[in-house]
Amino acid sequence: MARVLVDVMLKPEILDPQGQAVQRALPRMGFDSVTSVRQGKRFELELEDADPATLQATAEAMAEKLLANTVIEDFKVTVLVEDAGARGAAPVNTENA
C-alpha cells in the first residue's frame, strides 16, 4: 500500500468566505497576529500500486475529475514513498497551478 495526499485550495483570485470568517474570529479569541486565512481540504488516499509515477498520475487524474474543481481550485499531489532505511515516508510533490 502507498499513501498519497491531495491538498486542494481555492485559487488566490477566488474569494474565500470561510477563510475570511475564520480570520475575523481569531482576533476575538486573542490571536491578533493573523493577517490572512485561506481554507482548503485534504484527501489522504491509500493505493495498491507501488510505482511513484503511476501513483502520481492516478492521483492527479482523481483530483482533476473529482476531488478538485479545477476552474476555481488548485491542487497539490504528494506521494509518500516508504524509505527502506528508516521508518516513515519521504514526500514527492507536484502542483497543478
Image: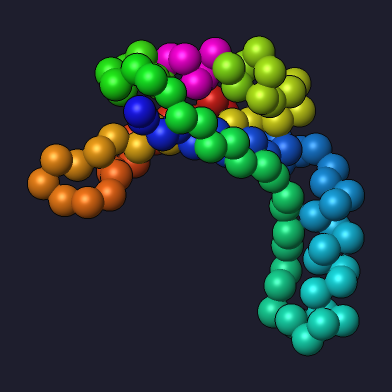
One can see residue 58 in this view: yes
- In the shown orientation, is residue 38 left or right of residue 74? right
Decide whether residue 90 is among the magenta residues.
no
At horizontal 16% and vertical 51% (from top left) the residue drawn is 86
The total of numbered circles placed on residues is 0
Quarter of the image for the N terminus: give it. Answer: top left
The answer to whether 54 appears left or right of 22 in the picture is left
Task: Give the camera-side residue of 27 and 56.
Answer: 56
Residue sitting at the far bottom: 30
Q: Is residue 85 left or right of residue 55?
A: left
Q: Is residue 38 above or below residue 13?
A: below
Return the x and y of residue 72 as percentages of the image width and height.
76, 28
Q: Is residue 25 above or below residue 39?
A: below
Quadrant in which residue 89 is drawn:
top left
Q: Residue at x 66, y 13 (%)?
A: 65
Residue visible at 35% across and 37% down in the picture: 80
In the figure, is residue 21 to the left or right of 64?
A: right
Q: Which color scheme does this rendered protein use?
A: rainbow
Give the overall secondary structure of the magenta segment: helix
Which residue is pictured at 74% across the width and 81% down the height? 31
Depicted 2 relative to depicted 26: above or below: above
Q: Nearer the viewer, residue 76 or 82?
A: 82
Q: Residue furthest left?
A: 85
Residue stretch in magenta: 57-61
User: Is residue 43 positioned above or below 96 on the image?
Assistant: below
Q: Quadrant of the C terminus?
A: top right
One can see residue 77 in this view:
no
Q: Quadrant of residue 50?
A: top left
Q: Position of residue 24 (x, y in %)?
A: 87, 69
